[in-house]
Amino acid sequence: MKELKIGYLALSKLSWKTPRIEGLAKDTEKELAKMEGCKLIAPEGLVTSEKEAQAGAEMLAAAGIDLLVMHFVTFPAGALIPVIAERIQAPIVLLANPEEACAGKMWEQNSFCGANLGAFVMRRLGKQYGYLKVMPAETPAALKKYLAAARCISAMKNCRIGLAGGRVPGFYTSNFDEMKTRAKFGVAVEVADLVEVVDTAAKLTPEQLAEARAVVKRSSCKVNNVPDKELELAAKMFGAFKAMTRKYNIEALAIRCWPEFSDIFGIAPCAVIGMLNDCGIPSSCEGDVPGAVTMSMLKQLAGGGIPLFVDLISYDEKANTGVVWHCGAAPVSLCRKFEETEYRLHFRVDGGDKKGVTNDFSLKPGPITLAKLDQDVDGHFRMLIAKGEAIDTEPFIRGNPLTIRFEAPIKNLIDTIMLKGFEHHYTVIHADVKEELLQYCAWMDIEPVMPEVK
């Protein structure tokens, strides 16, 4: 993942400057410099004047920082705060330290009070910000949700989604406002025809085809009645999509997987979609661009990981569980047991069991976050968020089932989905990123929608 640029400014009143105060700033800077996947950028010493604040902020802005940690080592001169905030476009975390009375009953730093002043200024200037009150050694861990949100904001600004073939018929849920999405997140959409997929597959080099065959071979344990020629078509399709992602500089895909794709190419793309996800290319079914965008967001917020594109097909109020599923397009790295994975003919295409290729298996247990970005009737963006625990799930139906016990009562989740009119596609990642997602929504002015937890 891309290195995150973190700016650090340590604020203090000049007259409050002591060796201990300087030591707190130096210790904090050392801890921040240790953060994996981050590059720390900071001017030397404490910022005590408007001139130093302006120079420091301009240096950080020129470096293109993704997040600023504004440390209130002491209560600063109030004028420093807007001087910095006006020059920084990135989100800002206001950092205060816990403190106790010193010798002579002195309250040496007045750190939190300074951060409180900072919050007032940030709010009035319309800045995106957060706050922490921790000691230097605790700062990196406490920044976790802010770092994740900043990483997601930065990554989405440069994200390019490939839309192959458009959305499928009648799936109005996959519609989206392309220019509003681009203006909001920076996401660009590159549209390609399914015929280009076929044409690209026919022009793969021997090396590209060999690589694709190897991916097909290792992505399932068994083959159940799928002809070799269809597995070869799966390799060609995978190779074609990989080649197109390089051609168009694409990070994620939304694929029109029916009704005509299997006629044009000879197989359905389900298993291939799973392979693409396993290779780090978030890929949604049925031409769902908002789904691909949400998958990309979850990947960034989890610091990697592989998101999953699903329907919610069943729920049980007594067991307080829901079942998410899709038709054999899950990435094999998320399987419950590799020995259960098998390539099969698709159970729907051409009447069922006529053409491949799906990869059937149930999905692994563990902490999960379910989410979906959409636009409400008035056009504003909102995000459905539900935390849960995936439980051990037998492969009780074709495709890729997963049973989840959600944090909220399942009835509350269903009421939220149905009464607020959310679409029937969701994304799931095997990680608890609820707090990170909420922080991202706060900074991006996305309405978070969550079922009530009782």
Image (spheres, grey):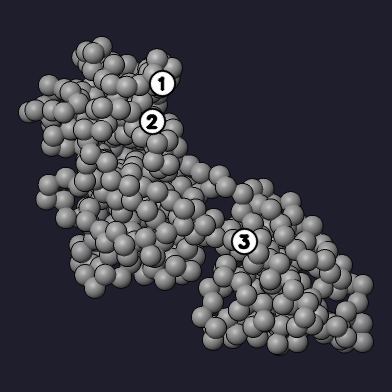
- Can I make out residue 191 in this image? yes
Q: Residue at x 31, y 54 (%)?
A: 290
How far from the left and from the top, in percent, is residue 98?
Answer: 74, 74
Q: Quadrant of the N terminus?
A: top right
Residue under label 1, please give it.
208
How far from the left and from the top, in percent, is residue 66?
Answer: 59, 61
**Which circle's residue, 3 or 2, is located before the other in the chain?**
3
Q: Amino acid at mark 1?
A: Gln
Residue under label 2, please give it.
243
Q: Residue at x 42, y 71 (%)?
A: 445
How far from the left and from the top, in percent, is residue 268?
Answer: 21, 29
SS type, badge 1: helix
User: How dense is the environment of label 1, judged by Cα within 10 Å: few (below 14), some, or many (20 and up)?
Assistant: some
SS type, badge 2: helix
Answer with the quarter of the image where residue 90 lies. bottom right
Q: Residue at x 67, y 81 (%)?
A: 83
Pointers 1 and 2 in contact (CB under 8 A)? Answer: yes
Whether residue 442 is situated above or below residue 78 in the rendered picture: above
User: How dense is the environment of label 3, judged by Cα within 10 Å: few (below 14), some, or many (20 and up)?
Assistant: some
**Which circle's residue, 1 or 3, is located before the other in the chain?**
3
Q: Residue at x 74, y 77 (%)?
A: 53
Residue under label 3, please give it.
64
How far from the left and from the top, in percent, is residue 253?
Answer: 34, 42
Answer with the quarter of the image where residue 310 lies. top left
**Which circle's residue, 1 or 2, is located before the other in the chain?**
1
Identify which residue, 234 or 72, lies in the foreground. 234
Give the spatial CA distance, label 1 vs label 3. Answer: 37 Å
Give the spatial CA distance, label 3 vs label 2. Answer: 31 Å
The reply, left or right, for residue 40 in relation to residue 345 is right
The reply, left or right, for residue 236 in relation to residue 140 is left
Identify which residue, 259 or 50, lies in the foreground. 50
